[in-house]
Amino acid sequence: MSNVYFTAEGLEKLQAELQELKSKGRADAAKAIAEARAQGDLSENAEYDAAKEAQGMLEKKIAELESSLANARILDSSKIDISKVTILCKVELKNIKLKKNFIYTLVSESEANLKEAKLSVSSPIGKAILGKKKGDKVEVQAPTGKIEFEIVKISLA
């Protein structure tokens, strides 16, 4: 697996999620299996099968998080060049047709969250603006057609 990039905050969240799954998640899964096992015959026990399947999915999620952490690299905002759009930049975009401005912070795919205005660098808009400079215009293909944006401002997140 290749490197996975995180902000310090994003890495902390990932570590906390992993710790929660390893402690509470595993304890809950073991409890569910024990309760289902107590109901008797395991060959026709749908609750037992469901609890074992849930445990398998939990272990898969734990393995994925551990793999991401093993390949994690922290992005250092002090080394970011804001003369062009890069990951961890805050970018103000103007939708030319709507004459409306939007501000997004470009982050890794794992930290993307539209409610927090964190846009993945691998999203259509993220890909379109990556490497561009203030004043550049970009077109993004959306389900409703092409949307044209102008890069108004680039700053540190």
Image: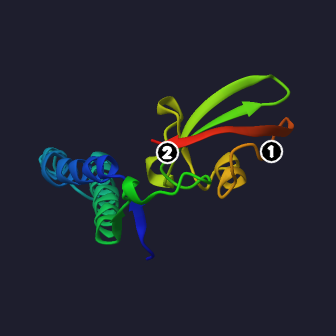
Most distant residue in the bottom direction: 1
The quarter of the picture where the C terminus appears is top left
Q: Observer-nearest residue: 84 or 110? A: 84
In this image, 33 relative to 46: left or right?
A: left
State the residue at coordinates (11%, 47%). 38
Q: Quadrant of residue 22?
A: bottom left
Can residue 36 be seen? no
Q: Observer-nearest residue: 134 or 92? A: 134
The amino acid sitting under disc 2 is Ala
Q: CA distance from mark 2 to mark 1?
A: 23 Å
Relative image position of residue 153 (x, y in whole percent): 62, 38
In this image, 118 relative to 94: left or right?
A: left
Relative image position of residue 152 (x, y in whole percent): 68, 36
Relative image position of residue 133 (x, y in whole percent): 69, 51
Asked if marks 2 and 1 touch (Cβ < 8 Å), the reply is no
Question: Which element type, helix, strand or loop, lies under badge 1?
Answer: strand
In this image, 130 relative to 58: left or right?
A: right
State the residue at coordinates (44%, 48%). 111
The quarter of the picture where the N terminus appears is bottom left
Q: Give the labeled residue for mark 1.
A: 137
Point out which mark residue 112 bears. 2
- Height in image: 101 above or below 138? above
State the residue at coordinates (36%, 58%). 76
